[in-house]
Amino acid sequence: MKRLIYTLAIAAMVMSCKTAQQPQAVAVNDVKVAIDLKNVKDDKVMVTIMAPSFTTETATFHIPKIIPGTYSEDDYGKFIDDFKAYDAKGNLLPVNKSDANSWQISNAKTLSKVTYWVNDTYDVESTHDIFSPAGTNIAANENFMLNTHGFVGYFQGKGEIPYTVTVSHPATLWGATSLTDTDPSNESDTFTTSRYAELVDNPIMYSKPDYTTFTVDGMEILISVYSPNGTYTAKDITPEMETMMRAQKKFLGPFNTTKKYSVLLYLSDMKKPDAKGFGALEHTTSTTVVMPEMMPKAQLVEQLKDVVSHEFFHIVTPLSIHSNEIQYFDYNTPKMSEHLWMYEGVTEYFANLFQVNQGLISEDDFYGRMSEKIATSKRFDDKMPFTKMSKNILDKQYKDSYYNVYQKGALIAMCIDIQMRESSNGQRGILSLMQALSKEYGNSRPFNDDELFAKITALTYPEVGEFLTKYVAGDTPIPYDVYFAKVGVKEGAVKKPSNPFLKGEMPYITVNPSTKEIVVLPEIELNAFMKKIGLKNGDTILSINGTAYNLDNIYEMIMSSMDWKENDPITMQIKRKDKEQTLKGKVTLSMEDVEGLHFTDTSKTKLKEAWLKG
């Protein structure tokens, strides 16, 4: 983490003195925040907020109940302790906690500041449902994940005024963020935002400096990594991230809504109480990512390609294209938009389409991903109107359908893309639609929820409007075969290599709970790989290619095996009837038939090429 000069106590005292010296009649129209990362007590951080002026007798202070991008009521106020309010002379003001996230302060005309302690979420994840990339971490002198919504609140009615945040921290720690630090010292950082929403939109991760930077078409990219055991560095993943983000920018074309973009990667130590919700959370100019540190590099890079590319594409929507509900987001009494199919679905579709478009994956890989999304989406209610689900996503009846925005939401985008290609004879697709919508609205002009479909229809074709009405707002399941046929693609059986240690969802291995050793199941038909290498039922697997495995890193073993290729050399150290021995050979991958997609109609080659490569 980074630099700050003054301790919180001194900074708070100076600001209090300034407030006391000012005539009461002078209005204070900004919010000053001090976050003390130096003096961590009982795994808590002190926050001091100098209040703006109030003309009312009471003021209400909120910590967010919900934040953009999560679509989940998480009650960050539960992690706030010892909330206090003071006047300019240091006298305590009466405070009443009105709900889990709100404090009502009396005598607000004399309010000078509030203080409180913040608990983190990572080391108590079993007690709540906050998604780790939206959570917080406090590890003194090691790491602070400042998802700012978990540390800084807002006064009701004052969310649109400027915020100045000063963070004091150990000199050994550096703060990775897309915000600009205006404090030159190495123990204090100062950040200024135009309003509360901009502050919440900019996470900061403090840790020992481990970062890389590169520039893509005028956009500065920052990759910052916290790896508690030093397993990975930013340099380890930067080449793949740079290749991916250059491809994304090339795919997007004229979209260039930010001059800096930061990837804050927190690698979780699975052997300790730590973050366990893996994935990423988007922000306008950054993304927070949480992944297990034990993940093999090849798998880590592949996962990052998918999750980071998804979050990066949010610079299209909802950054450039969003409704009033997003522009004026209410953190404590939220109103949700109807258009998750666009915010998350189009974004997820782009995160897959750009990879085949830019040659990072094959067409068959892309078809496989779409086929998996169809299969997964059918586990949900396929007749549920997507707009209704989106509007009511916080309700219990619809909450469990949220994951479907990444499945059917992406498929909705795919079908619109295909329809636009057909209607325009291959000249236009959903990317051109998003470009047109961006010109129509942009990041500072939101649309009305109920007007979007009409606007899209006007910018595209009647068939697109009919699709939106029937399959997105309506309760008719999408006939995917009809849309695939337009580009010459058909469903059918495809060959897929199976994992050497799994048969579908059934494992070939188990763990001896008393020794933590990995054991081949005693009564199971072994696969071709196991037979060829010489494994037998009941064998204990000690190591593979020099890496020892047991219960603590069995996940790493399985993930590594997913990258094995046919005829790769392999050496296994095993124990059979208490006698150790070495097995050597080559990898043999079993192939299994699964339902998938093929390109079969060559008369549609031109349209298919426009769809995937245009």
Image (cartoon, rainbow, N blue to C red):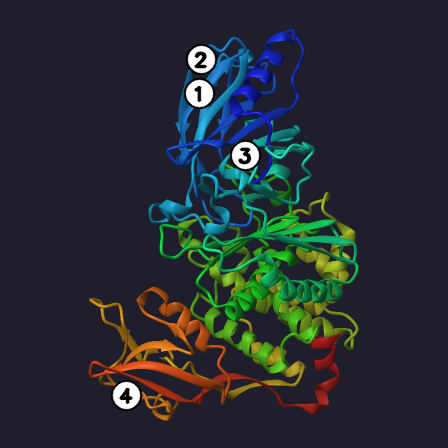
Q: Say which of marks 1 and 3 sits in front.
A: 3
Q: In the rendered image, which quarter is residue 18 located in?
A: top right
Q: Which residue has dot 4 on it?
A: 536
- The reply to whether callout 3 and callout 2 are in contact (CB within 8 Å) is no
Indicate the secondary structure of the residue bearing disc 2.
loop
Q: Which residue has dot 1 on it?
A: 84
Q: In this view, does 242 lie above or below 180?
A: below
**Disc assigned to residue 169:** 3
Amino acid type of the residue tagged 1 in the rendering: Lys
Q: Residue at x 72, y 46 (%)?
A: 443
Q: Which of marks 1 and 2 is nearer the N terminus?
A: 1
- Judge from the rendering whether residue 550 lies leftward or rightward of residue 391; answer left or right: left
Picture quarter with the C terminus = bottom right
Mark 1 is surrounded, within 10 Å at the Cα level, by few (under 14), some (14 to 19) or many (20 or more) other residues, namely some
Q: Which residue has dot 2 on it?
A: 92
Q: Can residue 271 be seen in this view?
A: yes
Picture quarter with the N terminus = top right
Amino acid type of the residue tagged 4 in the rendering: Lys
- Rendered location of residue 263, percent (x, y): 61, 53
Q: In this view, does 167 lie above or below 279?
A: above
- Rendered location of residue 494, percent (x, y): 51, 88
- The reply to whether callout 4 and callout 3 are in contact (CB within 8 Å) is no
- Rendered location of residue 322, percent (x, y): 66, 49
Indicate the secondary structure of the residue bearing disc 4.
loop
Q: Distance between the residues labelled 4 and 3?
A: 56 Å
Q: Residue at x 48, y 23 (%)?
A: 115
Q: Distance between the residues labelled 2 and 4?
A: 73 Å
Q: How many marks?
A: 4
Could you say which is closer to the camera, residue 88 or residue 417? 88
- Judge from the rendering whether residue 315 lies leftward or rightward of residue 546; answer left or right: right
